[in-house]
Image (cartoon, grey):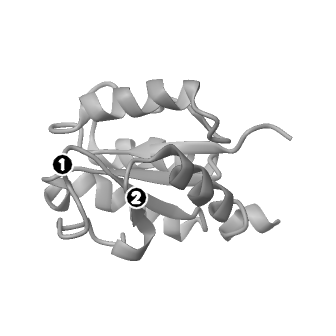
Amino acid sequence: MADPRAFISFDFDHNENEKNLFVGQSKNSKTPFCIEDWSVKSAMPESQWESKVQDKINKCNMLIVLVGKTMASAIGVAKEIKMAKDQDVPVFGVYVDGSNSSSNLPDGLQHNRTIIWRWEEIASAVNQMMIEGKNKK
């Protein structure tokens, strides 16, 4: 079986460096998932962005939210979380950029589903996501 596919949701204005580090480190970890860089690279009308992102999320087994300090104000991230939940794509978060359990989270993401950036814990969360949502099919 191929590794599960993960869509990475992050605050483009504040956490692009953390996203790049996360993706790079994931390739050298023993974490059982692959990340496709499906970020929308150019500005476009919101309805077009929503359609493209929704299609990309639907092709994934899970959505991983990189939770930075300013994440609660990232409107696009909250929309991506809602899209994932609407499509039965399970979601979990990973604290980055000095954020922690006292940080504000975007709408739709819970503290009990947000973990520290430790690859063993991420692997455990990935395995849990594979038994949830549409992955059960």
Q: Residues within 10 Å of mark 2 (few under 14, many from 20)?
A: many
Report which quarter residue 53 is drawn in: top left
Side of 29 where 3 appears, left or right: right
Q: Is residue 57 above or below residue 73?
A: above
Outermost residue on the right side: it is: 1
Residue displayed at 18% across by 62% down: 72
Work out whether residue 43 can be spotted: no
x, y percent for residue 58: 60, 52
Q: Amino acid at mark 1?
A: Gly
Query: Which labelled disc corresponds to residue 93?
Result: 2
Q: Nearer the viewer, residue 125 or 92?
A: 125
Q: Nearer the viewer, residue 60 or 24?
A: 24
Report which quarter residue 28 is drawn in: top right
x, y percent for residue 135: 74, 61
Marks 2 and 1: in contact by CB < 8 Å? no
Side of 8 where 17 appears, left or right: left
Q: Nearer the viewer, mark 1 or mark 2?
A: 1
> For the residue labelled by badge 1, is the local secondary structure a helix, a strand or a loop?
loop
Q: Amino acid at mark 2?
A: Gly
x, y percent for residue 129: 63, 62
Count of picture labels? 2
Q: Residues within 10 Å of mark 1 (few under 14, many from 20)?
A: few
Residue displayed at 56% across by 64% down: 90
Q: Nearer the viewer, residue 112 or 34?
A: 112
x, y percent for residue 30: 64, 35
Residue displayed at 46% across by 41% down: 52
- Compute the Cα span from label 1 to label 2: 14 Å
Which residue in the structure is indicated by mark 1?
98
Work out whether residue 93 can be spotted: yes
> For the residue labelled by badge 2, is the local secondary structure a helix, a strand or a loop?
strand
